Image (tube, rainbow, N blue to C red):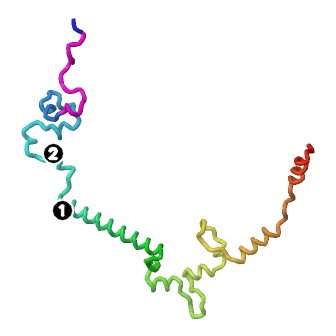
C-alpha cells in the first residue's frame, strides 16, 4: 500500500496562476465560489446581459458629476492660490466677504441724532449697563476697562506671602552645617 498516490481530490488548491473562472462554470459546486454569479454565469438568461448594471449609473449623470467635481476642485485651487498670494504679500489683502449688505449693517448699529444707540441694536447692547459683566463663554463679550483696572489694582496691592527661608537652608548646606 502506497502512502501517497496523489491528491485525494482533483482541482485547484490555491495558486493564482492555476485558477480559471471557466473551470468554475463547469464545476458541480460552482455556487460555493464567492462571486460565481458575476464571474462564472451559467444559464441562458445571462447570455448577452450586463450583470453589473446596478453598479453603473447613467452615462449622462456620470459625465455631469465628473464635470461638477472638476469645477469644484478648480475653484478650490484658485481660491487657495489667491489666499496664498495675499498672505505672501504678492497681492493686496481683501476683506472677507460679508453676508450682510450696507443697509443691514447700518440698521444693526443705528444711532439717533444725539449719537446714542437706538433700542434693540447691537450698539445699545454694548453701551448698556452690565454688558461687560455677562459671562457667555471665552472671548464672547468685551470686558469693561474700569473693572479690569480695579481687579489689577487688587492683585498688585494684595499681601505677599513670606518665603520659607530656602536661601538660608541652602547656605547652611553649602557651608556643611546639617
**Residue 66, image x, y percentages:** 25, 62
63 on left or right of 115: left
Task: Identify the element where label 1 is drawn.
Answer: helix
Nearest to the observer: residue 127 or residue 175 = 175
Q: Residue furthest front?
A: 175
Q: Is residue 2 magenta?
A: no
* Mark 2 crowdedness (10 Å alpha carbons): few <14, some 14-19, many ≥20: few
Q: Please count the marks in the image.
A: 2
**Residue 158, image x, y percentages:** 82, 66
Task: Identify the element where label 2 is drawn.
Answer: loop
Q: Residue furthest right?
A: 177
Q: Residue furthest bottom?
A: 113
User: Residue 51 has which mark?
Assistant: 2
Q: CA distance from mark 2 to mark 1?
A: 20 Å
**Which quarter of the figure has residue 153?**
bottom right
User: Magenta part mainly helix, strand or loop?
Assistant: loop
Nearest to the observer: residue 21 or residue 85 = 85
User: Residue 79 has which mark?
Assistant: none
Magenta region: 3-19
Look at 33% across and 65% down and name the residue there. 73
**Residue 67, image x, y percentages:** 25, 65
Q: Which residue is mark 1?
A: 60
Amino acid at each position: 500500500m502506497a502512502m501517497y498516490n496523489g491528491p485525494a481530490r482533483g482541482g485547484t488548491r490555491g495558486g493564482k496562476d492555476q485558477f480559471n473562472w471557466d473551470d468554475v462554470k463547469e464545476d458541480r459546486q460552482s455556487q460555493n465560489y464567492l462571486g460565481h454569479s458575476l464571474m462564472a454565469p451559467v444559464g441562458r438568461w445571462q447570455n448577452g446581459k450586463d450583470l453589473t448594471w446596478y453598479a453603473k449609473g447613467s452615462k449622462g449623470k456620470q459625465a455631469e458629476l465628473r464635470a461638477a467635481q472638476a469645477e469644484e476642485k478648480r475653484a478650490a485651487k484658485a481660491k487657495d492660490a489667491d489666499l496664498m498670494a495675499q498672505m505672501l504679500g504678492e497681492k493686496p489683502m481683501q476683506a472677507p466677504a460679508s453676508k450682510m449688505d450696507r443697509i443691514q449693517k447700518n440698521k444693526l448699529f443705528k444711532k439717533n441724532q444725539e449719537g446714542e444707540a437706538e433700542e434693540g441694536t447691537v450698539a445699545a447692547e454694548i453701551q448698556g449697563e452690565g454688558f461687560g459683566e455677562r459671562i457667555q463663554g471665552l472671548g464672547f463679550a468685551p470686558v469693561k476697562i474700569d473693572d479690569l483696572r480695579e481687579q489689577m489694582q487688587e492683585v498688585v496691592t494684595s499681601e505677599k506671602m513670606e518665603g520659607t527661608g530656602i536661601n538660608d537652608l541652602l547656605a547652611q548646606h553649602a557651608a556643611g552645617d546639617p
